[in-house]
Image (tube, helix red, strand yellow):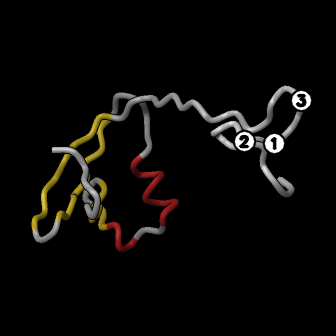
Amino acid sequence: MGSRPGDVIEGIDETPTKSLVLDEALMRIRGKVDSTVKMTIRRRHRRFQVTLTRKALTLTLPQIFDPLGEARSSEGKRARGSI
């Protein structure tokens, strides 16, 4: 059962998310690789718990500057304006 649009995280390791600001929630979700986090999810009128195992993520970011130093979008078009 994966996450779906409209899902709401209501709890992280038994702590209600209503009492957390975004940075606090992210700190509780992030953690040591291979450790677990338990989240309470609300989907429409149904509430359930999932336990996730944290893993390392590798992100590939789009190139922002070409070799000539011109700003480009992720589609390779020249950007207009200042960056």
Quadrant occupied by the N terminus: top left
CA distance separating discs 1 and 3? 9 Å
Residue 55 is labelled as none
Q: Position of residue 61 (x, y in %)?
A: 61, 35
Q: Position of residue 26 (x, y in %)?
A: 46, 53
**Snapshot quadrant of residue 42:** bottom left
Q: Which residue is mark 2?
A: 77
- Between circles 1 and 2, the one closer to the viewer is 2
- Between circles 3 and 2, the one closer to the viewer is 2
User: Relative to 22, is 32 above or below?
Assistant: above
The residue sitting at 86% across, 56% down in the picture is 82
Residue 68 is labelled as 3
User: How busy is the neighbourhood of tag 1: few (under 14 within 10 Å), some, or many (20 plus)?
Assistant: some
The one nearer the camera, 82 or 48, is 82
Q: Secondary structure at mark 2?
A: loop
User: How busy is the neighbourhood of tag 3: few (under 14 within 10 Å), some, or many (20 plus)?
Assistant: few
CA distance separating discs 3 and 2? 13 Å
Q: Secondary structure at mark 3?
A: loop
Residue type indicated by callout 2: Lys
